[in-house]
Image (cartoon, grey):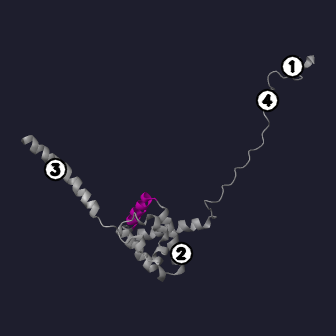
Amino acid sequence: MAKALVALTVWLCLAFPAVAAQSKAETRKPVRPAWSELTPAQQKILAPLAPQWDRMDATRRKKWVAIAERYPKMKAQEQKRLQKNMSAWARLTPAQRTAARKKYQSLRKLPPDKRREVAAQWRAYQRSLAAQPEFSPSDPPAPPAPPEPAEAPAVAPPVGTATADTPAAAAQ
């Protein structure tokens, strides 16, 4: 009887968490808003994020929707910059996004004078990039320079051929 009670207790301890986890997964609500719930205008603005939308949590989706709501009020230059940055963000891997978020949080914690210093360094870096010629990854790389011509190495004639220096050639 005691063995049966112990076996039943062990079975319940193992089975109950699995059942609870299964019921939680089944009752979990879908994250909102779904892509299909966005207006056509929002979908157009947030188009670079469409492939990742289903993997975003509700908080991030709501932040992007809020940005899409502000988008029509932005100046054309701000809209262009937002689209460029959104496309760049969408190309990042999840690990790169996490690192960027952590870096942003650490910068926010800096004292104001340090933040100004970092901002000045960033602007200087951007100016140095702007001064460089444009390079597109689709541009083919420049062909390597041809090697300097060198003297042709002396090559021995194939075995069995006669040259003027060999006895076989002299006999001819």
Residue identifier under label 2: 80
Q: Are marks 2 and 1 in contact (CB under 8 Å)?
A: no
Work out which residue is located at the far bottom of the displayed protein and give it: 73
Q: Foreground residue, 144 or 39?
A: 39
Looking at the image, tell me whether mark 1 or mark 4 is earlier in sequence order.
Answer: 4
Label 1 belongs to which residue?
166
Few, some or many residues within 10 Å of mark 4 (<14, 14–19, 20+): few
Measured Cα–Cα span from mark 3 to mark 1: 98 Å
Residue 101 x/y as whole percent: 40, 64
Q: Name the residue located 26 percent from the left edge and 57 percent from the top edge.
A: 22
CA gap, disc 2 to disc 1? 80 Å
Q: Nearer the viewer, residue 42 or 14?
A: 14
> Residue at coordinates 22% horizontally, 55% vertically from top-left?
19
**Quadrant housing the C terminus:** top right
Which residue is the site of mark 4? Answer: 155
Q: Residue furthest left?
A: 1
Q: Helix, strand or loop at disc 1?
A: loop
Asked if residue 125 lies left or right of residue 23, the reply is: right
Find residue 140 and report its horizontal and vertical position in percent: 66, 56
Which residue sits at x=40%, y=65%? 54
In front of the other: label 3 or label 4? 3
Q: Tell me which label, 2 or 4, sits earlier in the chain.
A: 2
In the displayed structure, 123 sits above or below 24; it is below
Q: Which residue is mark 3?
A: 12
**Residue 3 circle label:** none
| Kind of element beneath mark 3 | helix
For the N terminus, the quadrant is top left
What is the three-letter code of the residue carrying label 1? Thr
Query: Between disc 3 and disc 4, whose residue precedes?
Result: 3
Residue 94, picture quadrant: bottom left
